[in-house]
Amino acid sequence: MYDVHTHFIPQDVIAWLKENKSLVNAKWEKKDPNKEDFLVVNEKWGFELKKSFVDENLYLHEQKNIGVKHSLVSPIPQLFMYDFSAEITSELSQVYNRSLANWADRETEKISGLATVPLNSPVKAAGLLNEAMKLGLKGAIIGPGLSEYMLSDDFFAPFFEEANKLNAIIFIHPLLCEDPRLKKRMMPNLIGVPWETTVCATDLLLSGFLDKYPNIKVLLAHGGGFLPYQIGRLNKGYSMWNNVSSVLQAPPIEYLKRMWYDTVLWNEGSLQYLLNTVGEDRVVPGSDYPFDLCTWPPQISGEKGVNSLLATNVNT
């Protein structure tokens, strides 16, 4: 069994946060006596800093205990740091990437890693992606854009041009939705997170991004959000409206089949629909471990997709 959607925070990153806690407004808060401290950076998206986030031995033990033989480890979205200067984001990215690369080098059979990059400076992001992949990482995890730019915007071209040259995996992972309507009942997470993926992925699909950067392996979190379920609507729009079809070389369904999707859906019927729609070679097992809403163990369905996503990237 594989797990392509997991998260970890190396001790070097924790040390950096403590050293720079005033700079990035990092706080450790005890919210529940029965839980670990919550880590909050810049007053956004606090989360319980479980031991499995920071203890290498515990992480590997739990992966092995559940039957996972190889994991693709990503930095956590809360530490993308896009709200800060490019210098701060770059500095933490370098610390994070070196630490994950060193761990993956020590545990080659058990884990591979993805980098984090300063998406707020695409030129710097391109350089750090190149550097990270030379260290052995397989690509990068990024957010769905910045507040003022969608990922299809030319602003990000330097980064995606480099990713295309490197045949990199680009794992698009949403941040909490900040829509003011979604303030209660955990809706920023429950529907806001997949909605952010939906908006981002639909924009990439309709913009011609996948034709412009054919070598990038785009991996979408949480089963692609709501996009796969609404692909019929996109196909209908393609057949009706020239401003939808004019930049595409094929109907939207064909582009849907050119991206990869994890199995973090918590519903067998939804997962089966995804497999039937995009094909088994485009769906990869993932868990979102160790966040609260992880699917643990990861769904075994869709493991064939690991071959198409990771065959040349993971020494299995």
Image: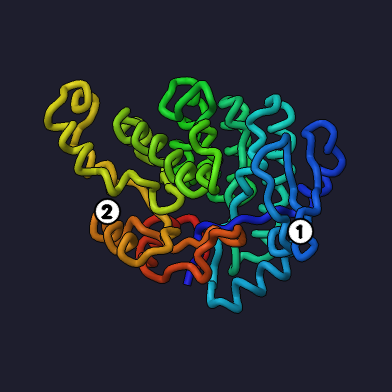
Disc 1 residue crowd, few under 14, some 14–19, many 20+, Cα 10 Å: few
State the image coordinates of residue 118 (x, y, percent, origin top left).
Answer: 62, 32
Q: Residue at x 15, y 36 (%)?
A: 236
As drawn, 222 above or below 118: below
> Which amino acid lies under the numbered mark 1 shown in the image of this protein?
Asp
Position of residue 140 in the picture relative to residue 236 (left or right): right
Report x, y in % for residue 293. 54, 59
Residue in the picture at 41% in, 44% down: 218
Which residue is denoted by mark 2 in the rendering? 278
Q: Position of residue 302 (x, y in %)?
A: 36, 65
- Colour scheme of this structure image? rainbow
Tell which circle, 2 or 1, labels the residue nearer the N-terminal end.
Answer: 1
Count residues near mark 2 (Cα–Cα under 10 Å), then give few for <14, some for 14-19, many for 20+: many
Among the 4 quarters of the image, the one containing residue 274 = bottom left
Q: Is residue 21 left or right of residue 314?
A: right
* Helix, strand or loop for disc 2: helix
